[in-house]
Image (cartoon, rainbow, N blue to C red):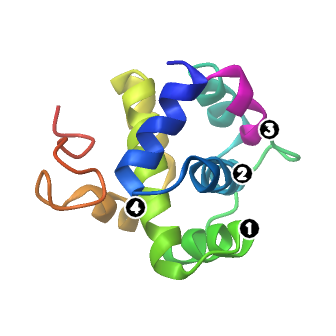
Amino acid sequence: MEYSEFLDRVSARARLSPELAERLTRAVLRTLAERIDSGEADDLAGYLPEQVRGYLVKDRISAEGFTLPEFVRRVQLRAEVDPVRAENAVRAVLSVLHDAVEEAEWAELMAQLSLDFRGLFEAAPGSGPGGPSAPPGSR
């Protein structure tokens, strides 16, 4: 997936300007890098456009074990947005990430996240920020 396509999808799914989509993509991927181990971060980075791979670079090997509410809080602080916009961005960026990676890789990522992350994708198709596309995991 090309960089512009990645950001266009995030922008459309979260209903964001291109500039805000870029800022929130950076915040979500940097927070994700804190939440997962370095091997998984490296694996995911290999699927992403070169311009966003660096957001998954980790300073340490181990993962921090925080839940979805803390993940959203960190994104909110990093991107300087309200909590609702941060949560919508988390959903959108992870949804586009799911589009970009193989199913086995997505399963490995989900195995590293707490169960509450799965709730991001349980809305009926077309009812959430992803618009008319089905939520990840329903393909």
Asked if disc 4 and disc 2 are in contact, CB closer than 8 Å, the reply is no
Q: Rate crowding at label 3 as few (under 14), some (14 to 19) or many (20 or more) other CA atoms within 10 Å.
A: some
Asked if disc 1 and disc 2 are in contact, CB closer than 8 Å, the reply is yes
Q: Rate crowding at label 4 as few (under 14), some (14 to 19) or many (20 or more) other CA atoms within 10 Å.
A: some
Asked if disc 4 and disc 1 are in contact, CB closer than 8 Å, the reply is no
Q: Does residue 67 appear in this view?
A: no
Residue 38, disc: none
Q: Nearer the viewer, mark 3 or mark 1?
A: 1
Magenta span includes 52: yes
Q: Amino acid at mark 4?
A: Phe
Magenta span includes 117: no
Q: Residue at x 30, y 58 (%)?
A: 129
Give the x, y percent position of residue 53: 71, 29
Question: Which range of residues does the magenta coloring cover?
Answer: 49-56
Q: Amino acid at mark 1?
A: Arg
Query: Earlier along the polypeptide chain: callout 4 or callout 3?
Result: 3
Q: Which residue is mark 1?
A: 78
Give the farthest residue toward the right. 59
Question: From the viewer's perspective, is 134 left or right of 99?
Answer: left
| Predominant SS of the magenta segment | helix
Residue 29 drawn above or below residue 7: below
Marks 3 and 2, Cα distance to the nearest angstrom?
8 Å
Give the x, y percent position of residue 12: 38, 46
Residue 57, disc: 3
Residue 117, disc: 4
Q: Rate crowding at label 2 as few (under 14), some (14 to 19) or many (20 or more) other CA atoms within 10 Å.
A: many
Give SS at disc 3: loop
Residue 31 placement: quadrant: bottom right
Give SS at disc 2: helix
Q: Which residue is mark 2?
A: 30
Marks 4 and 2, Cα distance to the nearest angstrom?
16 Å
Residue 39 placement: quadrant: top right
